[in-house]
Image (cartoon, helix red, strand yellow):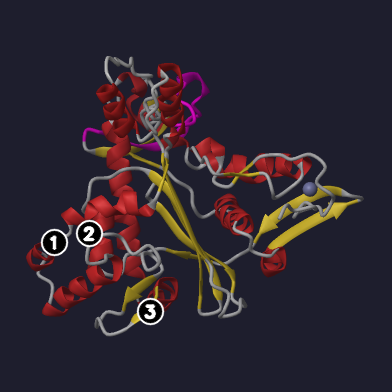
Amino acid sequence: MIRQNCVYCGNEITARSREHVIQNAIGGLYESTDICCPQCNNYISKYIDAPFTKIFNPIISQIDNFSKTNNTKSMQPCTGKVLYHGNLYSANIKAGRVVACPDLSRTLRCDATKLPLQIVSYDFNLENAAFQNGMNKIAFNYALDNGIDLNILKHGLNVTKASDKIENISFNYPIVPFCALNPVDIQLELHTPFLPYHSMILFGQNNKLWCYIDLFNTFQYYVLLSDKISAVHKVYNSYAQTLQKIDRTKPVLDICSPKDISIYAQQYGVEPCMDINEFSKRIYNAMDRKSQKTSFSKIIGPKIRYLSPEYIINGQHSGNELVLFGQSVRLYFNEFDQLNTNTFRTMTYTGDARDVVSYPEFINYFLQTDKDCLRNYARAKFETLNYFLCQRQK
Ligand SMILES: [Zn+2]
């Protein structure tokens, strides 16, 4: 069904505009033409998306072959910390280079940017309204694009209009930060090679509608879109994409016999045919279709080989942890080591490995007594990201 009226202003949608569910400036590829009118789309991109994506400037400039842009001229400056003779200083950084370091320059009375400064971390401001709005918008759009009725979501959307002109749009859904609470998630997130990707999971659970969002495999949050959905309302969908461009160099086909055709057909996953022109067209089309859009199974599945109970034993955890490890592996992976997509990130075991519970609700419960756990997890994720970004320093 195609939406007739804009979800923000309510006016009839007379022209279709493409709205990026995950903001295009941070490499998001998922688009929907079924959400709002072009005017509101402009408003959202200017006042919600732009301030939100600015937070991620340090990452955008440091990923090789980033799907959006790698043009140094278009890279926005950001801030971070540099190390000089054992001390940390705040610095302005552009495209991986220090462009200003006022405190150090003042102390040494010279232009500190000429010194060998080592960038050790980047700053991300996650405490502001821009972050909240941006995350909420992603969840809201993803739910709408999955056919969730606007009436279920309306309570978290504020639109102010003055004589038919939009004055303000904001979102206020509660957000729960993700924190790995079982040994499998801890290993997956903190002890496997880092690959930046974006993902979303929309799921209904205990009358609640959640959207899990993971940006750059670092900024991980649950957005609570509704706590009043009916229990029979079965919702589950997920999305994942990588962030680096795919090499689409067209191969030169060397076809001398029908056997070559069948080999190529297998290699590129296309139907064989004897008309060489038509056959090359099929291969080139298949290459164009090859996508950064992938799935959780493809991203998380290969990580299973890094999972090990040995790691827990060396980490001097109790025997209980070992049971929890085994239970969690069985919760997330089937007997063929494939990911159970509908339990991954939606469910976890309680600490005593007895009950399977809602992940976001368990985190909420856990945070009431133990905030250190989240702080330590978030710090470890940022260290991984910063290591990845600073490694690329020129
Ligand atoms: Zn509108």
Image label count: 3
> Quadrant location of residue 17?
top right
- Lower position in the chain sequence, tag 1 or tag 3: 1
Q: Decide: is 139 above or below 151.
A: above
Residue shown at the point (51%, 41%) measured from the top left: 28
Q: Which residues are magenta?
A: 66-85
Residue under numbered circle 1: 308
Can residue 79 be spotted in the picture?
no
Give the Cα separation between the discs numbered 3 and 2. 20 Å
The three-letter code of the residue at mark 3 reads: Val
Answer whether labels 1 and 3 touch (C-beta < 8 Å).
Answer: no
Give the Cα separation between the discs numbered 1 and 3. 23 Å
Residue shown at the point (27%, 79%) measured from the top left: 351
Can residue 152 be spotted in the picture?
yes
- Check residue 306 for magenta coloring: no
Residue 357: mark: 3
Residue under numbered circle 2: 187
